[in-house]
Amino acid sequence: MSTEKNTSEKIRLHPRNINRERYDLEALKIAVPELSAHLTINKYGVESVNFANPLAVKLLNKALLNHYYDIKNWDFPDENLCPPIPGRADYLHYMADLLSQSNFGELPSGETIKVLDIGVGASSIYPIIGVSAYGWDFIGTDIEPKSIEAAKNIVSSNSILEGKIEIRLQEDSQYFFKGIINNDQKFDFSMCNPPFHSSTEEAQKGSHRKVKNLAGKKTVRPELNFAGLSNELICEGGESQFIHDMISESREFAQNFFWFSTLVSKQSNLKGIYKALNALEVVQIKTIPMGTGNKSSRIIAWSFLTKEEQKVWREKRWRKSVEL
């Protein structure tokens, strides 16, 4: 990937991301008419969404999912995290690339791919995009019962998602995989968007910065639609501890996954993550840069499977549809 910086969010998005081009606001207003009341003229004299307004962002996301992904019913409590659709889609596109690289350049058939989304949230956004874009099957987990209820409602309210997404409550918050999957279950990859912050104060500072960047001005008390519920953005030890705990537990499920993966928002956490992975003697580690606008992030993926185990995996799971 080129290291040349580009301030255009659209150019930095994955080549298969359907939102690389400018939003078709006329089409989006037809999809969700309420969006019209939340458009503004930006400094370039062009009609745009008021991204500093949480309701405007949610309506934009509803319109994007309706128009581009055929999701007609998408709603959840306002206190939950409202995800940016293009950035979330990129995670899935890059994981599709990783599956292709693991299969000699050919993307395995969608119907054979099963994904575990750790922390699916009320919006169920990763499974929605994964089903729509690739036809993959998902199990989404969360520790918050209200988020589980909202995610289940979204799945049951959209016929294209039924039978493709299963939502499960993780009843013990100290675990990621235990209590969710059976010993013989296989997943082609796991994915996770970890909580960023270690405290409420840190999360509030982050929200202030985000609103200031979007609105171009300070706010005494920003509308925290961007923050979501506390367990969506805050955990003891922050992102670093969360990922370290996930890595540690992943060793017990080494044969259940071809790839484990997680987003890593803070570059300063990478050194410790690599150290933890090497200590467990993982067979492969992949770092995949990604970013939108002036925000950079990356996916860290790891696998415990040897070359022979990967070969068996491909033959049993990914070649099956070809043989049929």
Image (cartoon, rainbow, N blue to C red):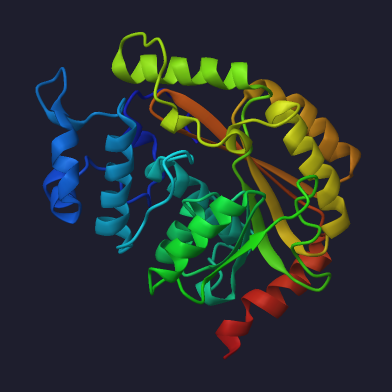
**How many numbered callouts?**
0
Residue 62 falls left or right of residue 4: left
Q: Residue furthest bottom?
A: 324
Q: Judge from the rendering whether residue 99 lies leftward or rightward of residue 212; answer left or right.
A: right
Q: Quadrant of residue 317?
A: bottom right
Q: Is residue 6 left or right of residue 142?
A: left
- One can see residue 131 in this view: yes
- Locate residue 174, reporting x and y percent: 80, 45
Q: Nearer the viewer, residue 112 or 146?
A: 146
**Which residue does the image show at 33% across and 62% down from the upper left?**
71
Residue drawn 46% across the image and 26% down it: 295
**Picture coordinates of residue 229 (x, y %)?**
55, 37
Q: Quadrant of the C terminus?
A: bottom right
Return the residue nearer the eye: 197 or 113.
197
| Camera-nearest residue between 82 and 266 | 82
Q: How far across and down, in percent of the image, does residue 231 sit?
A: 63, 37
Question: In terms of image quadrants, where is residue 9?
Answer: top left
Q: Residue at x 90, y 38 (%)?
A: 279
Q: Position of residue 210 (x, y in %)?
A: 43, 20
Looking at the image, is 157 positioned above or below residue 92?
below
- Reply above or below: 105 against 222: below
Q: Residue at x 67, y 49 (%)?
A: 143
